[in-house]
Amino acid sequence: MKICGIYKIVNKVNGRYYVGSSKDILGVRWKQHQRELNNKTHHNAHLTNAWHLYGKDNFDIVVVEEVPEDRLHEVEQKYLDICASNPEQAYNANYAPDGGRPSAESIRKISQKLKGRVFSEEHRQKIGKAMIGRPYSEETRAKIGKYSAARVHSVETREKIGAAHLGQKRSKETKMKMRLAGVGKHNNSGTNNPRFDSTMREFLHCGTEEKFLGTRFDFISRFGLSAGMVSEMVRGKREFVKGWRIVNSDTEMRGVA
């Protein structure tokens, strides 16, 4: 007899569990989980590691609630919201049915749980290594760009960025690459290298109405902005950079200190 509903795969040693839903919990779904966990092809790395650490005999599947097929995802989301509020007790890595987008309630609970959380230096290094070489889809890159364009650094953040660059030493190789990048780019108006652009421009922040008058390089350094994005704005390929725009794009004040 097929059982349709919500289930948990429970670690009998520490009580930690994985929540899921299926039209056939004890038949097809449980067999699939066991096969993938044994072969280390399961989509959930946390559960896979625990399965091999504690041994398969220390895991049970439990039917939590029988649910009509047309309400499976709706009910599963309620249990996943509970997982989101207690991530230490659940193996789930994604709090949405079928790996989709988590509900607003899940996102709120995750955010609340992470507020004020401080990662150790070792943990931060592991996160950094895991991100190296990670490919992003075109859609993800577009979302990151859209977010960055509207992001405004606080005065405190800008001061930290400036302080982090003070006394920074570059290798000979890096210095040589920077020199080569600047070869033939010493003209004032169309340069891609902000260090050699002496044009004075007035910038305006559309949100705070703060104004800044200076060279492109001074502007980038002062507010910790992307040199590439500001260069695109100067060349007219971008209208805004994190809320900033050029006020006097047609007026050049060269040589003004």
Image (cartoon, grey):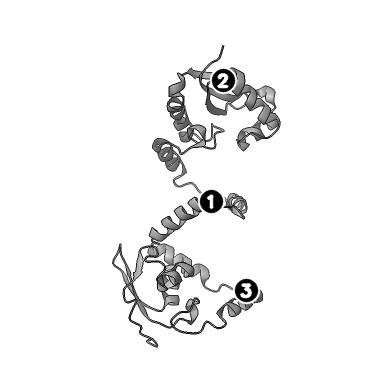
Q: Where 2 sits versus 36, above or below?
A: above
Amino acid at circle 1: Ser
- Identify the secondary structure beneath mark 3: helix
Residue 31: give its label.
none
Amino acid at circle 3: Thr
Cα separation, mark 1 vs mark 3, equals: 29 Å
Mark positioned earlier in the residue sequence (3 or 2):
2
* Foreground label between 1 and 2: 1
Q: Are marks 1 and 2 in contact (CB under 8 Å)?
A: no
Tell me which residue sits at (43%, 58%) in the image: 148
Tell me which residue sits at (59%, 23%) in the image: 29
Q: Looking at this rendering, what residue extends furthest in the top direction?
A: 1
* Foreground label between 1 and 3: 1
- Identify the secondary structure beneath mark 2: helix
Q: Which residue is mark 3?
A: 174
Cα separation, mark 3 vs mark 2, equals: 58 Å
Cα separation, mark 1 vs mark 2, equals: 34 Å
On the picture, is 109 further left or further right than 60? Answer: left
Q: Which residue is mark 2?
A: 25
* Label 1 environment density (alpha carbons within 10 Å; few <14, some 14–19, many ≥20): few
Tell me which residue sits at (48%, 69%) in the image: 228
Residue 137: give its label.
1
The residue lying toward the viewer, choosing from 195 and 57, is 195
Q: Looking at this rendering, what residue extends furthest in the bottom direction?
A: 255
At which x and y percent is residue 117? Answer: 48, 46
* Label 3 environment density (alpha carbons within 10 Å; few <14, some 14–19, many ≥20): few
